[in-house]
Amino acid sequence: MAVLLIGTLDTKGEELAFLRSRLRQAGVEVLLADVGTGGPPTVQPDITREEISDRDASDRGAAVRAMAEGAARLAKRLHREGAIDGVLGAGGSGNTAIATAAMRALPVGVPKLMVSTMSAGDTRDYVGGTDVTLMASVTDVAGLNSISAQILANAAGAMAGMVGAPPIEPHGTKPLIGATMFGVTTPCVDHARKRLEASGHEVLVFHATGTGGRAMEALVESGFLAGVLDVTTTELADDLVGGVLTAGPDRLLAAGKVGIPQVVSLGALDMVNFGARATVPPQFEQRTLCEHNPSVTLMRTTPDECAELGARIARKLAAATGPTTLFLPLRGLSLLDSPGQPFHDPEADAALFRALRTVDGDVEVIEMDCSINDPAFAEAMADKLLALL
């Protein structure tokens, strides 16, 4: 068992040395990598900063970015060579950015633990779509005291336990399918999932909350998924308009880049997500809003926004290298987008459909005169994906 321990040894040498000793006491071999960007290391590393990055220390921001990229390359190489079984880091914002970049470079399932002062709040940049575990440091990682020593000892014990745990029994050999779902597209995904499972596939459902979309696409890039049923592409609307559930500008690219079959639809593109009603930005006060629950407020997308969403989706799907089919539900994009519901807006939906009917490339476009949650629509999407597989 071996762990890559990543830290800035110019400022956190004492703490990293303590982590190393605790890991060794637990019977774990340690490769200590120095990713400091300031003064000389206070502890001798196994892997020097010069081996990781040829950085420009005069610009700290550039140095941290370069070190993060180098740490990611290092972790990926060491794991590929079988030299490490997990990655552990501890520090503030700088080392959190560097160490978690290394963690995100590894496949899902490889133990990844970061003791960080940044573990509360918005951590999406650190976790991405992977299984990084964040542990709150409570105090700053600045010397050993009665609190920090216990936290770091717990972290070492947790990492030792993860890398030393017996492997799990294989869950099965069924091909894995990724599917995206929101509450307002649940009937569609549930129906399609049952059809896919009945055909001998295992379906992994991802909640399209930004993190969910990134997680699915990370699994695609890691080679875990045989195909994608991307019913719910709502994260694209948040990315365009400024909602809180964006998965970033690269959402909807992974399956096309890898070349696996994908069947895509427009689930919940009728909405942008915000937090509690009081958090909706003031420029949107006159828009159509729906309080989904006390913590979630939804906003209807406009015809102009829908046209732009359609153009973006068309460009992304046109670049796909694998079999790609796009389904258009002409009578509604979600449970809220039907006659009598607050987001029913045929003009906005029509703008979205118009932009997508001219998609370039080898994308098959299938239009159905029903809502996205109609059982016939779900069955058609599932059957198309099975045919492409």
Image (spheres, grey):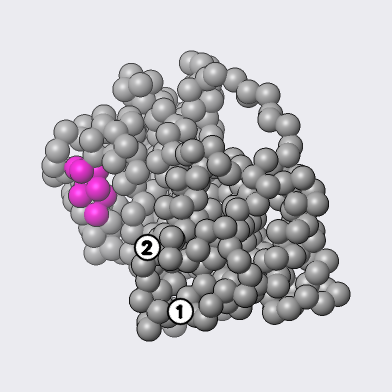
> Mark 1 is on which residue type?
Pro
Which element carries disc 1, helix, strand or loop?
loop
In the picture as drawn, the residue positioned furthest to the top comes out as: 199
User: Which residue lies at the image location 33% right of the left edge and 54% below the top edge?
Assistant: 250
Whether residue 302 can be seen here: yes
**Residue 245: percent from the left, percent from the top?**
48, 61
Q: Which residue is mark 2?
A: 239
Q: Is residue 234 above or below residue 384?
A: below
Which element carries disc 2, helix, strand or loop?
helix
- Residue 321's image quarter? top left
**Residue 231: percent from the left, percent from the top?**
41, 40
- Numbered badge on residue 25: none
Q: Which residue is mark 1?
A: 281
Q: Is residue 182 magenta?
A: no
Q: Nearer the viewer, residue 367 or 194?
A: 194
> Mark 2 is on which residue type?
Asp
In the picture, measured across the screen, residue 257 lies left or right of residue 108, that is: left
Estimate the spatial distance between the alpha carbons at disc 1 and disc 2, rounded to whole Å: 15 Å
In the picture, measured across the screen, residue 73 lies left or right of residue 173, that is: left
Q: Which residues are magenta?
A: 312-319
